[in-house]
Amino acid sequence: MKIKYGRQEITKDDVAAVVDVLNSDLLTQGPVVPSFEKVTCEYTGAKHAVAVNSATSALHIACMALDLGPGDWLWTCPNTFVATSNCALYCGAKIDFVDIDPQTYNISVEKLKKKLEIAEQNKNLPKILVPVHLSGQSCEMKEIKSLSKKYGFKIIEDASHAIGGTYKNMPVGSCFYSDITVFSFHPVKIITTGEGGMALTNDSILANKLRQHRSHGITSNPKEMIERPDNEIWNYQQIRLGYNYRMTDIAASLGLSQIKRLKEIIKQRHKIADRYNQELNSLPLRTPWQHPDTFSSYHLYIIRLDLEKITKTQPQIHDELCDLGIMVNLHYIPVYRQPFYEKMGFEAGYCLESEGYHREALSIPIYPTLTQEEQDHVINTLKKIIV
Ligand SMILES: *Cc1c(COP(=O)(O)O)cnc(C)c1O
């Protein structure tokens, strides 16, 4: 029996929804993508949603829509997937990292404040900050938003883990405290479209730019087109640089079917998390601390080992669990420790909190179809191994 740290759930309804599209006339850019966008807007409260083929693409066009370019800085935290920072490099911008909070493992508002004060003096303030809602627990967006007003940077929320979560009783994705929010629909995330992502915003100008960047930088809106002679056909014009980042109707139909179950999915994830919270209480480890302003989607359940009380190392515990079929994982290696980033000049020791976390954290299985039996097996094995 192999138990992964996360996996998708595909129901009969999901399959039927996809088959319906396969039997229809339009496989891409049909009616289902806008339906999926509309339902996601209704769920989150955001005014506009732009579905794309991955969260990575969504991050890229979000940076483009906010005019990130050479000479600009994008800041994020190191405790994330590499895509969060790569989007800066796609735009030719420079990347820097703010260390994490020791309790939430999200970006530290204190450290952000200090770094901004220094950057203001050195005249290298960021153009964009990307807070990442690790495991589905929102960052402290109110504080971050007020800093953005003081220092003039834009905010892209990387909510790849966080659809279905809330912050101050508002759905993550509402964009109340940000310019753009990004979701991922990779199979391991909360809901899936196979590969897929979405960028949400309340700003109609940004939404229009996001749509153009999604599709080659092309418009067919006569109001946006340059005047050309009447005796030539100009049914579309390219007015900026874009890509083909579109989501297919096939993928969107799966997302549309899945999002209907979102509340139920989050409920199941909480049930599993609550049980871990109780059962793992007595072990030499920290269960995930929850900020009172947040309601997590629990994409991940991250335990932090108290290595002073354990005879084994974190890699030993990781390997022993995997050998027994419990496929734990680590989220995340600090991005700047990746060889590609070290080549850019980053060195070990840059963000000590993130590095300490890296040596102690493990993501244990959590997903809606994890049975009670399977969870018992995980709990009992952890109790046996963590000594
Ligand atoms: C999964 C993930 C991404 C990338 O998502 P894709 O849809 O696979 O491109 C970006 N950021 C974070 C934090 C993620 O977990």
Image (tube, rainbow, N blue to C red):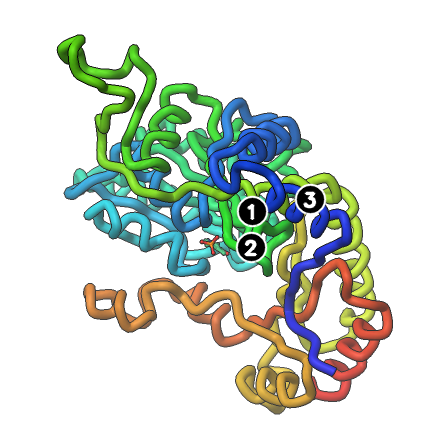
The response on whether ligand 1 sits within 8 Å of label 2 is no
Label 1: element kind: helix
Foreground pick, 71 / 119? 71
Residue under the image location 49 percent in, 45 percent down: 197
User: Can residue 255 be seen in this snapshot?
Assistant: no
Task: Return the mark for residue 194.
Answer: 2
Q: Which residue is mark 1?
A: 251
Task: Return the mark for residue 168.
Answer: none
Q: Which residue is mark 3?
A: 17
Instruction: Give the CA distance from mark 2 to mark 1.
Output: 6 Å
User: Can residue 159 be seen in this snapshot?
Assistant: yes
Instruction: Give the CA distance from mark 2 to mark 3.
Output: 14 Å
Q: In which quarter of the view is residue 379 placed? A: bottom right
* Quadrant for the N terminus in the image: bottom right
Amino acid found under the numbered disc labelled 1: Ala
Residue under the image location 52 percent in, 49 percent down: 184
